[in-house]
Image (tube, grey):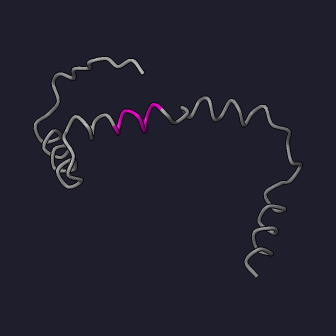
Amino acid sequence: MRTEIVQVRDVPSAELDVLRDRAAARSISLSSYLRELIHHDASRPEIGAILDRIATRASVGADGTDIRELIAEGRT
């Protein structure tokens, strides 16, 4: 896997302190922690893509009343 160097400027000190503390709490370096955050964010689809995928699905033909009744049945 090819990697790149990323530099982030103008990060407020208070926010950087929080990130350092979170990395330290996990006994990892700040760089490792930031890599994990980037990987987690990049591996998840954006909400727009999710909504587009949902929009292509066929309707189930149920209204709010039907859904509430099914939920109530499931709770009993």
- Report the quarter where the N terminus lies: top left
Q: Residue at x 26, y 20 (%)?
A: 6
Q: Is residue 37 magenta?
A: yes
What kind of secondary structure does the magenta stretch mostly adopt? Answer: helix
Q: Which residues are magenta?
A: 36-42
| 63 left or right, relative to 35 | right
Q: Quadrant of residue 72?
A: bottom right
Q: Is residue 12 magenta?
A: no
Q: Residue at x 39, y 17 (%)?
A: 2
- With respect to residue 55, does 64 lie above or below? below
- Report the quarter where the C terminus lies: bottom right
| 61 left or right, relative to 43 | right
| 69 left or right, relative to 23 | right
Q: Residue 15: x and y, percent? A: 18, 40
Q: Residue 36: x and y, percent? A: 34, 39
Q: Quadrant of residue 20?
A: top left
Residue situated furthest bottom in the rendering: 76
Q: Quadrant of residue 41?
A: top left
